[in-house]
Structures are given as C-alpha cells and as structure tokens.
Amino acid sequence: MLAIVGLLGYGLLKKNPASLQIGQRAPDRTLPTLAGGSSGDIADYRGRWVLVNLWASWCVPCRQESPALETFYRAERTHDFTVLGVDSQDLSDDGMRFVHEFGVTYPQLHDGPGDLGHSYGTLGYPESFLVDPKGHIALIRRGAVTADYLQSTVRPLIDRKAAAS
C-alpha cells in the first residue's frame, strides 16, 4: 500500500512533459455539451477571458470548489469573462446530476474519455486554465480553486490585462 501511495505521489510531483506553459495557445477540441444536443469549444469564447475548469462528478475537490466557481462566474460574466466547465472521464448522467446538485449555470462540455485533459497535460482533477481573449494560457491552477484564489489571483490578472488592452 505504501509503495502505491509513493508512486502516486511521485507521479503528481513529477512534471508532466505534455504540460502547458503560460503564453502557449490553449488546446481546443470540439466537444458535445454536457446536456447533449449541441457541441462547443474554447474558440467559441474568443475575445473573452475563459476559465477552463476540468472536473469530474466523482472528484471530491471538484465538489468543494464548485460553489466558488459559480459565485465568481455570476459576478464576472458581464465583464467579458466566463467559466467553461469540462466534465472529464465521467458519465454524462453523473455530470448532469453534479450540475443540478450544485446549481451550476456556466457552460458545460463533456469529455468522457479525457482527451482534452490529456492535451492540457492534466495530472488530476480539478484543474483550471485561464485563457486570454486571444486564446493563450494566462494562468494554470493544478488543484481546486477557492473564492480567495479567484478574487486574489484570477480577478486582478483579468482586470490588469483588460486595462492594458
């Protein structure tokens, strides 16, 4: 058991060679919406700031961060900003139950096999990537976000870069 925990810890600490770097173009892929019936991608939001949040219904930290993401989305959505949830490595029915349970209103895509996450070099869930209006990675958060993180790190970055435009 200790060996398994050690290997998992090593894997999380080891830098993923596929990991994105700030300034790189955000990987994009057309995915079905979580509710079904249509599709979308990150490029649909070009010209806006997008916090791409990769999550799964079975992920405990995802459940913990969901209220903070929803509150931040509601406060900032009129300022050329959105949160784009990507339910990954999950069943869409489970993802929909999660969305209803937490009252999530920001857009949701579904990536059942986790292909988009692989493109982002994800190490686990949740992970968030702030994409600037031109489609480049501006910030990477491996692990859950909190209300304090969103206010102290994401909001000033958006405000500062928006003022410079």
Image (cartoon, helix red, strand yellow):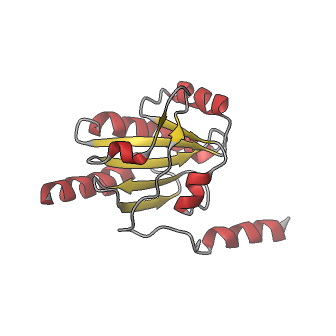
Q: Is residue 146 visible?
A: no
Which one is nearer the viewer's eye here, 129 or 10?
129
In what quadrant of the picture does the N terminus appear? Answer: bottom right
Residue drawn 42% across the image and 59% down it: 26
From what the image shows, is residue 119 above or below residue 99? below
From what the image shows, is residue 147 above or below residue 5? above
Residue drawn 56% across the image and 26% down it: 101
From what the image shows, is residue 23 above or below residue 43? below
Residue at the far right: name it: 1
Number of numbered discs present?
Answer: 0
Q: Is residue 158 visible?
A: yes
> Is residue 15 toward the left or the right of residue 75 in the image?
right
> Is residue 9 toward the left or the right of residue 66 in the image?
right
Residue drawn 34% across the image and 43% down it: 45
Location of residue 78 by image quarter: top left
In what quadrant of the picture does the C terminus appear? Answer: bottom left
Residue 136's spot in the image, x, y percent?
35, 61
Location of residue 36 by image quarter: top right
Residue 158's spot in the image, x, y percent?
25, 53
Residue 37's spot in the image, x, y percent?
53, 25
Residue drawn 38% across the image and 55% down it: 130
Residue 35's spot in the image, x, y percent?
55, 27
